[in-house]
Image (cartoon, helix red, strand yellow):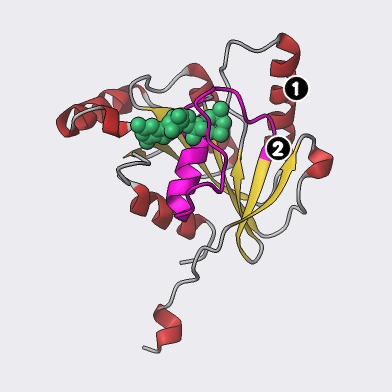
């Protein structure tokens, strides 16, 4: 087999744009994978760990910081999408409506969306809005996987136990992956999934 055939395209991430309305989305061509999840659940950290770039996506100790949809290019016509987190209580109703509207605009008509990671803090488990996301993806025929983030906060055995507990209440079909950005747990598996969705493997 030639070297060409076994080579995979390297992820070469760069920030494209932050969008506050559908008009600001990049052209809906090629393929993209989105990261959704509760505010502070580790979406931006997961993007950084998976792309191997420490501060590509801005992370924050303060929940609810990301109010835009941030698009990153990882290869020619292949993108990652960092969505604003949901479920953060301490914002005004007006801002919450704005977020919901923006997320709806994205999910309603994004034809290039080919995969969805939902980040779920392993200690919290899957919540109602995560369920909404996962069932929306299932209805839209978009494959989804849950990243059970912050697994480093639990011991190894507690992590496995917790995953089984969460699996018992999770909607069927979406795999659950133990994940830790600082420990790089599940990072290679998530990257393999991402590449498959983006047809980069
Ligand atoms: N210990 C640990 N901390 C993490 C992990 N992932 C994220 N964090 C921390 O959790 C906080 C929130 O992480 P972010 O990646 O900014 O979360 P987010 O989901 O993008 O948050 P919003 O954009 O506000 O919705 C930060 O303080 C991160 O350092 C993890 O796997 N382990
Ligand atoms: Mg974020």
Q: Would you say 75 lies left or right of 54 here?
A: right
Q: Which residue is at the far bottom? A: 2
Residue 124 is labelled as none
Most frequent secondary structure within the magenta stretch: loop
Secondary structure state at the residue bearing disc 1? helix
Secondary structure state at the residue bearing disc 2? helix
Q: 154 or 61: nearer the eye?
A: 61
Q: Residue at x 38, y 26 (%)?
A: 170
In space, the residues marked 1 and 2 are separated at their CA atoms by 12 Å
Residue 58 among magenta residues = yes
- Number of the front mark, 1 or 2: 1
Span colored in magenta? 40-69
Q: Would you say 50 lies left or right of 138 here?
A: left
Assess disc 1: are there few (<14), some (14-19) or many (≥20) residues with their C-alpha within 10 Å of its C-alpha.
Answer: some
The tag earlier along the polypeptide, 1 or 2, is 1
What percent of the width, then of the height, locates residue 95?
Answer: 73, 17
Q: Residue at x 70, y 44 (%)?
A: 110
What percent of the width, then of the height, locates residue 137?
Answer: 55, 37
- According to the picture, the residue beneath numbered tag 1 turns out to be 98
Q: Residue at x 54, y 58 (%)?
A: 198
Q: Which residue is at the far right? A: 23
Q: Can residue 173 be seen from the camera position used here?
A: no
Quadrant of the rendered structure where residue 63 is? top right
What percent of the width, then of the height, locates residue 142?
Answer: 55, 44
């Amino acid at each position: 087999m030639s070297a060409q055939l076994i080579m995979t395209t390297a992820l070469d991430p760069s920030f494209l744009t932050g969008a506050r309305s559908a008009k600001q989305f990049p052209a809906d061509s090629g393929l993209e994978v989105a990261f959704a999840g509760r505010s502070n659940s580790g979406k931006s950290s997961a993007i950084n760990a998976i792309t191997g770039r420490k501060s590509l996506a801005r992370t924050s100790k303060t929940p609810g910081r990301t109010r835009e949809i941030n698009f990153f290019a990882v290869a020619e016509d292949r993108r990652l999408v960092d969505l604003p987190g949901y479920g953060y209580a301490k914002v005004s109703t007006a801002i919450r409506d704005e977020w919901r509207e923006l997320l709806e605009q994205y999910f309603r008509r994004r034809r290039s969306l080919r995969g969805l990671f939902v980040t779920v803090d392993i200690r919290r488990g899957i919540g109602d809005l995560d369920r909404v996301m996962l069932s929306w993806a299932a209805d839209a025929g978009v494959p989804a996987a849950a990243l059970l983030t912050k697994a480093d906060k639990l011991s190894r055995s507690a992590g496995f136990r917790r995953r089984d507990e969460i699996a018992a209440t999770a909607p069927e079909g979406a795999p659950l992956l133990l994940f830790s950005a600082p420990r790089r747990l599940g990072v290679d598996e998530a990257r393999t999934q991402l590449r498959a969705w983006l047809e980069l493997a």
